[in-house]
Image: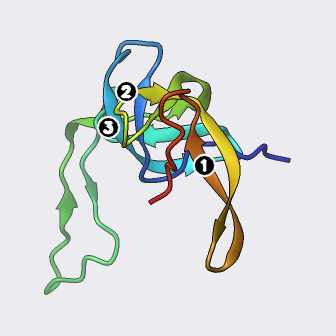
Amino acid sequence: MAQAMKVRKGDVVQILSGKDRGKQGRIIEADPKKRRVLVENLNVVKRHRRPRPMKDASRMGQTQIQPGGIFDLSAPVDVSNVMVVCPTCNRATRVGYEFRESKDGRMKVRVCKRADCREVLDR
């Protein structure tokens, strides 16, 4: 069974290791089963693609061709190599959970673990 990740789609994260160490980006996609996240414009790799006919290309009998070439794609990063950036204190932080009172009752929220911040990460 996949363990729950403390990062979510839409979070701003900082890369901790690798060629993009220290850079920040937004999570586009999270995969808890593989424990990997796709970060916008980070961990970019080049992929060579061959031109090929498009599926469902029925434009007056002519086949449309998807262009080939060299494309830059964002590759997934392991979740252990990213850290959430707190929107309040603007620093990379570990994520903690607290139960806060709200109009709906008690809610479990993610909080910044910095001692001088402790602000809610979920907005």
Determine whether the residue tagged by mark 2 lies in a helix, strand or loop: loop
Residue at 61% of width from left, 25% of height from top? 80
**What is the number of the mark on residue 28?**
none
Q: Which residue is mark 2?
A: 43
Judge whether 107 appears above or below 6 on screen: below
Whichever of labels 1 and 3 marks the residue nearer the N terminus, that label is 3
> Mark 2 to mark 3: distance in Å?
8 Å
Q: Nearer the viewer, residue 83 or 43?
A: 83
Residue at 69% of width from left, 49% of height from top? 98
Q: Quadrant of residue 101?
A: bottom right
Are circles 2 and 3 on residues that touch, CB within 8 Å? no
> Mark 1 to mark 3: distance in Å?
30 Å
Tell me the mark number nearer the camera, choosing from 1 and 3.
1
Q: Quadrant of residue 3?
A: top right
**Residue 79 locus on image (x, y percent):** 59, 32
Tell me the mark number nearer the camera, choosing from 2 and 3.
2
Determine whether the residue tagged by mark 1 lies in a helix, strand or loop: strand
Whether residue 7 sits left or right of residue 47 in the image: it is: right
Q: Is residue 103 visible?
A: yes
Quarter of the figure that contains the C terminus: bottom left
Q: Which three-letter amino acid code belongs to the residue tagged 2? A: Asn
Q: Which residue is mark 3?
A: 73
Whichever of labels 2 and 3 marks the residue nearer the N terminus, that label is 2
Q: Is residue 45 visible?
A: no
**Residue 39 locus on image (x, y percent):** 40, 39
Q: Which residue is mark 1?
A: 110
Which residue is at the far right? Answer: 1
Determine whether the residue tagged by mark 3 lies in a helix, strand or loop: strand
**Residue 92 locus on image (x, y percent):** 44, 27
